[in-house]
Image (spheres, rainbow, N blue to C red):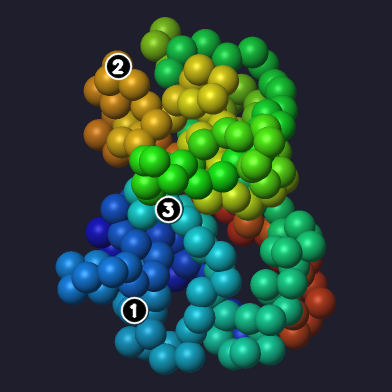
Amino acid sequence: MQHSIVDADAWLLVVEKPSGLLCQPGRGADKQDCLLARLNQQWPAARIVHRLDRDTSGLMLFALDADTHRQLSQQFAARQVEKQYEALVAGPVVASGQIDAPLRKDLDHPPRHMVDAALGKPAVTDWRVIERLPDRTRLQLTPQTGRSHQLRVHLAHIGCPILGDPLYAHAAAMQLSPRLALHATGLTFTHPASGQRLAFRSDCPF
């Protein structure tokens, strides 16, 4: 599991995270190897701005100073950062649509999350079909919110779980992929120093 640097300057890093690598340290000695720790070896001041699940691969953004971190975090909070993903899901899906289903932690089954119309926080995901195959569909996903496990829970909620998802896929969908078939392909944001709108793209590896 090796990460790659997509772009680097005096203010920030754009990095491609591999599947299976934590983005930040977890609890326990066996969860200290993570993308942030690896980056800190070369960039000691690097700090995480947003997160990807361990088994999700793709583009991540890191700040190299406190002011950049604050400004980028504000862009995420204000939904000024555009994110795109690709996923392989089980079964057929209509050409496009939107999932609007509030989410919260599933306190009875951690670390899972769940749809809860009464107690959940707003969560919205747009999807578009890219490719149809006999037993799966390739989707482009655009989250309008950034809830934990949002894409994974939303797709399972509509009966089309992401292939290889150990938390939300049924047995048949688990068998169709050796990894979670979810990749962060696009990241667009405004550079805090230059004010330039930047767009980065990562090819889907599956």
Amino acid type at image mark 3: Asp
Q: Earlier in the sequence, mark 3 or mark 1?
A: 1
Residue 166: image location, x then y, percent: 31, 36
Relative to residue 90, is residue 5 depicted above or below? below
The residue that appears at 57% across and 71% down in the rendered structure is: 49
Alpha carbon distance from label 2 to label 3:
22 Å
| In-image side of 89 versus 146 (left or right) | left
Mark 3 lies on residue: 53
Residue 144: image location, x then y, percent: 72, 45
Mark 2 lies on residue: 172
The residue that appears at 28% across and 20% down in the rendered structure is: 171
Amino acid type at image mark 1: Ala
Relative to residue 179, is residue 11 depicted above or below? below
Mark 1 lies on residue: 37
The reply to whether residue 157 is visible in this rendering is: yes
Q: Secondary structure at mark 2?
A: helix
| In-image side of 3 versus 126 (left or right) | left
Q: Earlier in the sequence, mark 2 or mark 3?
A: 3
Q: Secondary structure at mark 1?
A: helix
Amino acid type at image mark 2: Ala
Q: Earlier in the sequence, mark 2 or mark 1?
A: 1
The residue that appears at 63% across and 52% down in the rendered structure is: 146
The residue that appears at 67% across and 16% down in the rendered structure is: 95
Do labels 3 and 1 touch, CB within 8 Å?
A: no
